[in-house]
Image (spheres, rainbow, N blue to C red):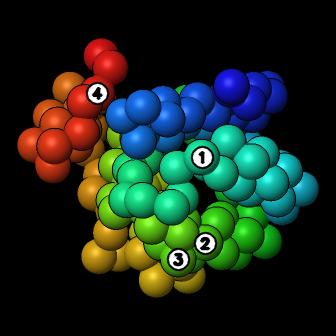
Amino acid sequence: MSGWRLEYSIDADVENRVMYVKIFGVWRVNIAEAYHQDFMEEAEPLIKKPWVRLIDLINWKMASPDGIEALGKHMQWCNENNAQCAVFIINNQVTYNQLQKMFEKGKAKDTTKTFRTHAEGIKFLSDLGYTMRE
């Protein structure tokens, strides 16, 4: 099962307990809320045990203030539903600063890591014991 829209794609690897996400473009609250709904549906088979997220933000442009708020709530939901860790791949200072605000709003600073490349993120999650795709 995988969710896909112009603004994001979500792919649940149930066997290995990994959510793969790609985020694109400019996000407003309506996109953030649709993403959260789709994400919860995709994550349903994972949330009874620890799981991780690998989120590719390379093509993400920005989020509106209410979008940042909604995504902070999304991060909090993940943490409350057995997400062990989230790894964000990001290489843009503006979006990095917005991501930090989301971490604060979602009380997720202790469960998130940021890297500039996929290889670094995959290595980090592999070192935690997760089987990752390239």
Residue where numbered disc 1 is placed = 45
Q: Position of residue 30 (x, y in %)?
A: 89, 56
Residue where numbered disc 2 is placed = 77
Contact, mark 3 vs mark 2 (Cβ under 8 Å): yes
Q: CA distance from mark 1 to mark 2?
A: 15 Å
Q: Nearer the viewer, residue 49 or 101?
A: 49
Q: Secondary structure at mark 4?
A: loop
- Is residue 15 left or right of 71 when viewed as pictured? left
Q: Residue at x 37, y 59 (%)?
A: 50
Q: Secondary structure at mark 3?
A: helix
| Residue 93 seen | no
Residue where numbered disc 4 is placed = 132
| Residue 53 seen | yes
Earlier-in-chain disc, 4 versus 3: 3
**Crowd around label 4: few <14 · some 14–19 · many ≥20 (10 Å):** some
Earlier-in-chain disc, 1 versus 2: 1
Q: Residue at x 40, y 52 (%)?
A: 51
Q: Nearer the viewer, residue 34 or 116?
A: 34
User: Which residue type carries mark 2?
Assistant: Trp
Contact, mark 4 vs mark 2 (Cβ under 8 Å): no
Discs 3/1, front: 1
Contact, mark 3 vs mark 1 (Cβ under 8 Å): no
Residue where numbered disc 3 is placed = 80
